[in-house]
Amino acid sequence: LLVYIFAKLVFSAPITIADPVAFVVILMVTLLSLASIGLLFALAFVLSRRSYILTSILEYPIYVLSGAVVPITMLPEWSQPISMVLAPAWGVEASAIPGYETVFGFGMVGNALVCVGLMIVYIALAWFFMRKIVKNVIETGSFTRY
């Protein structure tokens, strides 16, 4: 949302939102997909006191590879498959302004559905790994792994 506002105010870009309701829904789905990635990062915080380093290293590349900073089409071609496994990239593609060259090509609804699907996969992975961690804690009596 800030990127759209910034582009409109600073660059006077002619930004039109074809369907404002769909845009808000896709924005919420994209934010939830970022939160689901955060769930996976949270597992590292449970296991290590130094996981903030991992988060610091991965946070900005996730924003770049998801297309939130620059369009995915401007990234090197080798990075586009990495973008395809990031749910926020699909949300960014779904919310693209008319005339924007998309990479994935599933349209607004298709991209939003893939974003939701990947978000569900992230949440399932977080749930699976958290159960493993809890089982390990019960067996060893300690949260600290490293």
Image (cartoon, grey):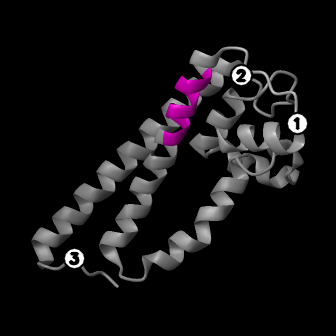
Label 3 sits on what residue type?
Phe
Q: Are circles 3 and 1 on residues that touch, CB within 8 Å? A: no
Locate residue 26 relative to residue 13 in the image: left or right. left
Where disc 3 sits, the SS reads loop
Instruction: Quickly name the residue at label 2.
Output: 106
State the image coordinates of residue 10 (x, y, percent, origin top left).
Answer: 84, 45
Q: Main secondary structure of the magenta part?
A: helix
State the image coordinates of residue 65 (x, y, percent, origin top left).
Answer: 71, 52
Where disc 2 sits, the SS reads loop
**First in sequence: mark 3 or mark 1?**
1
Q: Which residue: 30% across, 70% down?
A: 46
Span highlighted in magenta in the image: 23-31
Instruction: Quickly name the residue at label 1.
Output: 12
**Alpha carbon separation for disc pair 2 and 1:** 29 Å
Q: Are circles 2 and 1 on residues that touch, CB within 8 Å? A: no
Q: How crowded is mark 3: few (under 14 residues within 10 Å), some or many (20 or more)?
A: some
